[in-house]
Image (cartoon, helix red, strand yellow):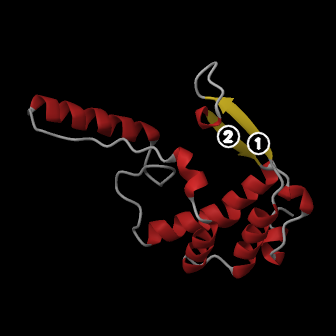
């Protein structure tokens, strides 16, 4: 049932309604640029996107070796603890050997509002996602009511 909209290319109207929640980054600071805005979609839609799109994308990235060795996520044989252990070990080794080093901690979680939907859809097509799925996403993004 969850994947039917992706097969037909048209999302049901109830999935096109989004609740926007604003959270303050700093208490008492209410200007818009000091708020996090979270768009809450229907949970079935998020689950369906994870299964239909996310899984296929993940397998494609794994098969093409496009994921860096430092990326652990939910990969086979990789654990969250391994990421932390590797960071601690690298920092300890560079401190003990007095080797100059630079670390970049890049967290792009808040950059989703900077993505261009048309380019995302083209990339999904390039990665082998069917046109019915990209049509469904395009319709969903174009007709979402906040």
Q: Earlier in the sequence, mark 1 or mark 2?
A: 1
Residue 87 picture location, percent across and down: 31, 37
79 lies left or right of 120: left
Classify 2 as above or below 95: below
Residue 79 picture location, percent across and down: 45, 43
Pointers 1 and 2 in contact (CB under 8 A)? yes
Question: Crowding near pointer 1: few (<14 within 10 Å), some, many (20+)?
Answer: some
Q: What residue is pinned by disc 1?
A: 20
Single out the residue that lies furthest toward the front: 31
46 lies left or right of 145: left
Can you tell which quarter of the image residue 5 is in? Answer: bottom right
Question: Crowding near pointer 2: few (<14 within 10 Å), some, many (20+)?
Answer: some
Which residue appears at 74% of the width and 75% of the height? 135
Q: Secondary structure at mark 2?
A: strand
Q: Secondary structure at mark 1?
A: strand
Residue 67 picture location, percent across and down: 41, 61
Residue 57 picture location, percent across and down: 56, 67
Of 32 and 128, the residue lying toward us: 32
Q: Which mark is residue 118?
A: none
Q: What residue is pinned by disc 2?
A: 37
Which residue appears at 59% of the width and 37% of the height? 33
Which residue appears at 63% of the width and 34% of the height? 35
């Amino acid at each position: 049932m969850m994947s039917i909209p992706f097969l037909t290319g048209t999302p049901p109207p109830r999935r096109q309604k989004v609740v926007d929640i604003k959270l303050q980054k700093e208490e008492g600071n209410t200007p818009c640029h000091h708020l996090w805005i979270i768009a809450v979609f229907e949970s079935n839609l998020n689950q369906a996107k994870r299964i239909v799109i996310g899984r296929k994308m993940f397998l494609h990235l794994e098969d093409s070796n496009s994921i860096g060795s430092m990326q652990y996520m939910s990969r086979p044989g990789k654990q969250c603890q391994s990421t932390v252990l590797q960071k601690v070990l690298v920092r300890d080794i560079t401190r003990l050997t007095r080797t100059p080093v630079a670390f970049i901690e890049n967290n792009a979680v808040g950059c989703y509002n900077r993505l261009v939907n048309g380019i995302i859809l083209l990339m999904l097509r390039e990665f082998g996602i069917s046109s019915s799925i990209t049509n469904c996403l395009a319709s969903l993004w174009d007709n979402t009511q906040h």
